[in-house]
Amino acid sequence: MEINSVYKTDCLLGFKNIDNESVDLIFTDPPYCQNRAQNITNLKNHKDVVTEFKFDGYSSEKEYLRFIEKVLRECYRVSKDGASGYLWCGDDFVSYINRIVEKAGFQFRKVIHWHKTNPFPAIHTRKIFANSMELIVHFSKGTPKTWNHKHVNEMHNFIETPICMGKERKKHQTQKPLKVCIPFIEISSNENDLILDPFMGSGTTAIAALMTNRNFIGFEIDNGYCEIIAERFEEFVLKHANFKGIKPQIKL
C-alpha cells in the first residue's frame, strides 16, 4: 500500500492491506453528522439549521457503534506500540465511544472539546441551545511514546475556532478546520511518521499531514468526497511547488 494516498474503498477492506504495527497515529472523523431543518425563513447567512442527531448510512445507534468497534479493533492491530489516536464524535454518544475504545484494546486518555465560535443557530421554537461543541476522544496503544509538549496554554483539552469558512470550506457537511486538527497531530506524531485516517471525508487529515511533514494513508468511499480530496491535493501541490517531491493521490 502506497503512502500519501487515499484509497477509494471501504476502510474495513482497506485495512487488510496495512501491516500490523505500522501506523504512528490514528486521526479520524467517522461518518456522523447533524440533521438540518430545511426551509427555515428569517435566518440571515444560514441556509439551514442544526436540529437533531443522525448516523450516516446506519439504521440505528447500535448498528453504527458495532461498526465503529470493528474499525477500532483494526486500528489497534495496525498501530505501533505507543501510538495515539484521535476520534471525533458527538456529545450524544461519547461515553459509548470511550468504552468501545477500551474494548478494542486501547487506553482511553481524555475527551477534548472543540468550541465552535460561529455555530449554526438553534431553532427558537425547539427551545434548545445551539450546538456549539464537538468532541474528540484521545486514546493510545499503551503509554504514548510521542508527546511533543507545546506551550502550557496549548495543552488544554479545549480548543476554540470558527467552523470552516472562506477558501478552506468545501462541500462537506462536517468538515473540520485545519486549525483544530494540526495541533494534536503535532503533539502526537513526529515528522515522517505515518498517519491513518479510515474516513478521509474532505481530506483534512491528509492536508494537515502534508503541512506538518507527516505521511498519510486514508480511505474514502464517497465519489464526491474523493473529488474534493483530489481538488485539495491539486491546490496544495500548486501552492507548495517545491514540497518534498511528494505527489499525494487518490487510488481508485
Image (tube, grey):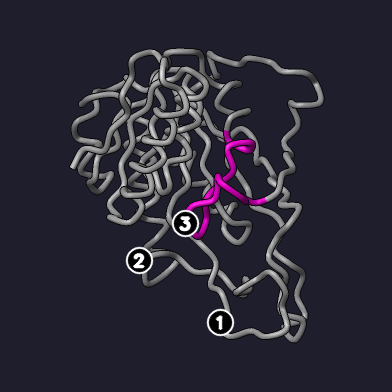
- The answer to if 176 sits in the magenta stretch is yes
Q: Amino acid at mark 3?
A: His
Which is closer to the viewer, label 3 or label 2? Answer: 3
Viewer-side residue, 147 vs 233: 233
Question: How many angstroms separate mark 3 from mark 2 (CA)?
Answer: 16 Å
Q: Amino acid at mark 2?
A: Gly
Q: Which mark is residue 172?
A: 3
Determine the image quadrant of residue 76.
Answer: top left
Q: Is residue 82 above or below residue 180?
A: above
- The answer to if 14 sits in the magenta stretch is no
Q: Are marks 1 and 3 in contact (CB under 8 Å)?
A: no
| Quarter of the rendering occupied by the C terminus | top left
Residue under pointer 2: 57
Magenta-colored segment: predominant secondary structure: loop
User: Would you call the spot at circle 1 few (<14 residues within 10 Å), some (14-19), or many (20 or more)?
Assistant: few
Viewer-side residue, 79 vs 43: 43
User: Would you call the spot at circle 2 few (<14 residues within 10 Å), some (14-19), or many (20 or more)?
Assistant: few
Tell me if 71 is positioned left or right of 39 in this view. Answer: left
Question: How many angstroms separate mark 1 from mark 3 (CA)?
Answer: 17 Å
Give percent across and percent down for residue 171.
46, 57
Residue placed furthest toward the right? 153
Q: Is residue 237 above or below residue 88?
A: above
Residue under pointer 1: 38
Question: How many angstroms separate mark 1 from mark 2 (CA)?
Answer: 20 Å
Give percent across and percent down for residue 154.
75, 26
Give percent across and percent down for residue 81.
42, 17
Q: Earlier in the sequence, mark 1 or mark 2?
A: 1
Q: Which residues are magenta?
A: 163-181
Label 3 SS: loop
